[in-house]
Amino acid sequence: MPDSLADRPWLRSYPPGVPADVDVPDEPLTAALHRSAQRFPDRVAVDFSGRATTYAELDREVARAAAALAALGVRAGDRVAVALPNCTAHVVAFFAVLRLGAVVVEHNPTYTAEELAHQLADSGAVVAICWQRTAAEVVRVLARTDVRTVVAVDLARDLPRAKRLALRLPVGRARTLRAQLRATVPDGCPDWHRLLQAATPLRDDVPGPRADDTALLQYTGGTTGTPKAAVLSHRNLVANAVQGAAWAGLRDGEETVYGLLPFFHAFGLTLCLTFATRIGATLVAFPKFDPEAVVAAQRRRPATFLPGVAPMFDRIAASAERTGADLTSIRVAFAGAMPVPAATAARWEALTGGLLIEGYGMTETSPVALGNPCSPDRRPGTLGLPFPSTAIRVVDLDDPTTDVGPGERGELLVAGPQVFVGYWNRPQETAASVLPGGWLRTGDIVVVDDAGSATLVDRSKEMIITGGFKVYPSQVEEHLRAMPDVQDAAVVGLPGGELGETVAAAVVLSPGASGVDLATVRAWCEQRLARYAVPRRVEIVADLPRSPIGKVLRRVVRDRLLDRPGPD
């Protein structure tokens, strides 16, 4: 880690009160929950659709769940799959697995059996805690995994009693909601809530995990190839929660965090679940993103900190404007995964009176590595500055041992206590990703100014090489989004004969628009782009494939275009 200010110029831009470095306690993630239960026993830890669970209750429920899992044979070091939407049971299961010294493996609960099969087999998980809908998918591929027990979770059991009773009503709305929450459970799958009711809480003297033990396997890389699991230790995740608390300046025991982002994604897991627990905040958990539900919850339990992605902020703002909801309790909103348009930031900050802070991270950094200052100096559209105890370098795209100067494009390298241990059972990929000194190769192309603030240019793996020229998809996409009648666009490289690759664009039109074709797109792009960067193929599509947090999946776009016959 660089020591001098000359090596860390970004420190000059830190807001008052933000430390250059943080002390990362030598403790597991579970210590923060137990401490919050002692400090704030009667404070609401989790609010799920209006059902409140205090910190004292959550701590006891985790102890019961840990005992129930131990009775199923879960031991320290075992991997336990968790495939749940955001709910109280997800929070309990996460900490219960960790309490035993076992390893959480997070999965998207909407995955198909085939998508789950690879991850379950790869991790070697022995128990799977699943939403009822997901349990059936896991059972279909059980023979191809090491999973010996599939525990089914009834999401409705986490609802307030009045809402559970309402599900029984013989009306269409109740039937629809019941079908969304519940599903037929395969034979032999024990019920999560019944297991907990029958369990005696795990004793405090049962040994737990240590700081350097593995806490989480988080699958990543699905946009660039077969997903692989990033290994994150308790220390990695504790470090990022401590860094986030120092950066945002939030107050212990006083905050309300909205869990809109899925906990099965690294962004939602840290910025919502572990971050809230560390500072004794109330976590309001949403099973899916619904702006109307957010506005309704805002009336019941106003948020103070709201992590999300750019489209979420626009949709919440629109709902609040339509209903007259008050958002002024939200002092800080943290955005990641994609650039935040200046108009989105201005709209949000006008409605809330707070700040919309853009940051950057990846699963391998637990996940946050950089952030804009939580001050009027924040710059929408940029990644911001390295977090406390975090250092960055920008290196030549062809030679990662050579640094480039301020203002030059290069690959971003990151070092810090939040950088992952490596990829699960993939030593060669780990060695290729982490350079000597602990420098993680992010694969992202950035430009860093003299003050140390970074701006994303593109993904190096998604950069297009055509006729020997480098084309950055995000630059072409930005220009296309400014075109009349174009709502969104994704740009990819397709096999292009002697050119190597050819630039292709998938374009989503604005409602009611027409008349956009290859000729009009090329004419528009030629106004500002070099000729080699102008798309040679344009496909009009209804929508773009996105990750669970809304990031466009360029690899999927590319595969779809390859499956369609192009122009002669």
Image (cartoon, rainbow, N blue to C red):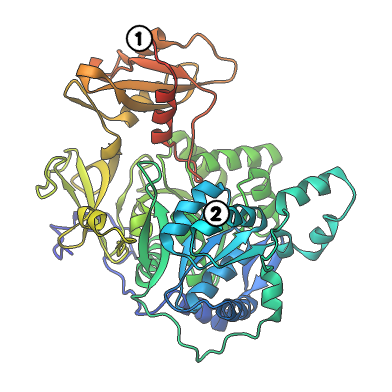
* Label drawn at residue 147: none
Q: Earlier in the sequence, mark 1 or mark 2?
A: 2
Could you say whether the residue bearing mark 2 is in a helix, strand or loop?
loop
- The circle drawn on residue 523 is 1
- Is residue 391 something one can see in this rendering? no
Could you tell me residue 264's position as x and y percent? 51, 56
CA–CA distance in space, label 1 to label 2: 51 Å
**x, y percent for residue 474:** 34, 31
Query: x, y (%) of residue 561?
Result: 42, 24
**479 or 522, which lies in front?**
522
Query: Quick check: 355 left or right of 281?
Result: left
The answer to which of 78 and 390 lies nearer the viewer is 78
Q: Residue 450, relative to residue 251: is it above or below?
A: above
Which residue is more in the foreground, 381 or 261? 261
| Residue marked by disc 2 | 141
Quarter the N terminus occupies: bottom left
Q: In percent of the image, x 65 and y 78: which residue is there?
A: 57
In this rendering, the answer to whether 5 lies above or below 554 is below
